Image (tube, grey):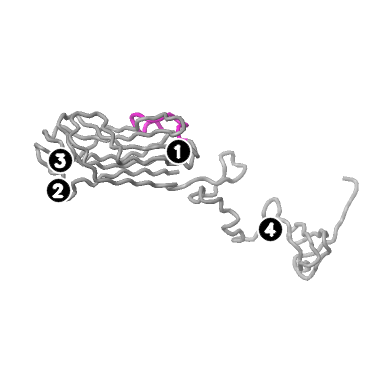
Amino acid sequence: MATQLKIRRGTTAEHASFTGAEGEITLDTTKDTLVAHDNYTAGGRPMLREDLNNLANNSIGPAKIDKGSSLRNSILRVNAAGNGVEFGYQGTLQTHTKSGNNDFGSIGHQNEYQCSWLDINSVTCIKTNSKWFFSGRVPTDDTNSSSYGVGMGFWIQKVSDSSSYWIQRPAQHEDYDGDATDSYKVARSTILWDPENSGRATSQPPNGYMVAGEAYNFRVYIRNNNSNMRYFNGNDSNSHNQWFQVWEIA
C-alpha cells in the first residue's frame, strides 16, 4: 500500500453538473462511492456500495426480482445460514380439480375401490418435498345398518418409475339421510400431506418422493366394510356430485 492514487472527486451536487470522459472514474464524496462516466451522461453512473447504503428506497422494480412463473408465489427471505437472501415458496403453487357423475354399479365388499374416473394425471411437482392437500367426495348407497361406514383414501404414483403409495386416514363418512337402516353414505375426506412429517397420514410415500420437475398421477379410492355397497343411485338431487381436488402448497 506504499503507492497512493487519488482520482477526481466531488460531492453529489458537484457531480450532477459534471460529465466525465468515456472510461473515467470519479469519487462521490457524499455517497462514498465510485462513479463511472461515458462522456455524455451528466453526473455519471454511481456504483452500488457493498453495504447498499447508497441504494434509494423503493428503487428496485418488480422486473429486477421476478423469477418467472415457477416462483411467482414466493417471498424473498434470509437464507438458513443467515449470510444472504433467497427466494422461498409461499402459498398455493398449483390446483387441480376433477368432477364426475359416474354410476359405478354394485361393487360389494371393496377395501380399496378405485375411482379411476376422477383420476388427476401427469401433474408436475413444482417444489421438492412440498405439502399436498387432497380432498374428495363420492356419495354411495350403503344398504345396511348405519354401523357400516364408507371411508376414503388417496393414491399417488410417480410417472417416471411407476412407484406408488397410499395416503390414508381413518375412515370418514356421513349418513346422508340420517336413517338407521338403508342409509345413504357420503364418502368424504380431506388430508394435508406433508412429506417431511410422517404424522400427517397413516401411510405415505417416503421423504424425498416428491421431486420438482417430476410428474405424478393421483387417484381417490373408497373403503367400506359392507358387502352391499352400491353407487348412489340418483334418487336425490345430490345423487352423484363426485369430485377430487389436488393442491400443491409451499
Residue underneath mark 4: 54
The quadrant of the picture occupied by the N terminus is top right
C-alpha distance separating marks 1 and 3: 36 Å
Is there CB contact under 8 Å for labels 2 and 3? yes
C-alpha distance separating marks 4 and 2: 69 Å
Q: Secondary structure at mark 3?
A: strand
Report the disc number at residue 215.
1
| Residue 196 location, quadrant | top left
Is there CB contact under 8 Å for labels 4 and 1? no
The quadrant of the picture occupied by the C terminus is top left
Nearer the N terminus, badge 2 or badge 3?
3
Q: Indicate yes or no whether the magenta region holds residue 93.
A: no
Q: Amino acid at mark 2?
A: Asp
Above or below, 51 against 178 in this view is below
C-alpha distance separating marks 4 and 3: 70 Å
Q: Which residues are magenta?
A: 197-210
* Few, some or many residues within 10 Å of mark 4 (<14, 14–19, 20+): some
Above or below, 136 against 107 in this view is below
The image shows residue 128 at horizontal and vertical percentages of: 49, 37
In this rendering, position of residue 144 left or right of residue 43: left
In this rendering, position of residue 226 left or right of residue 168: left
| Residue 137 location, quadrant | top left
Above or below, 175 against 166 in this view is below
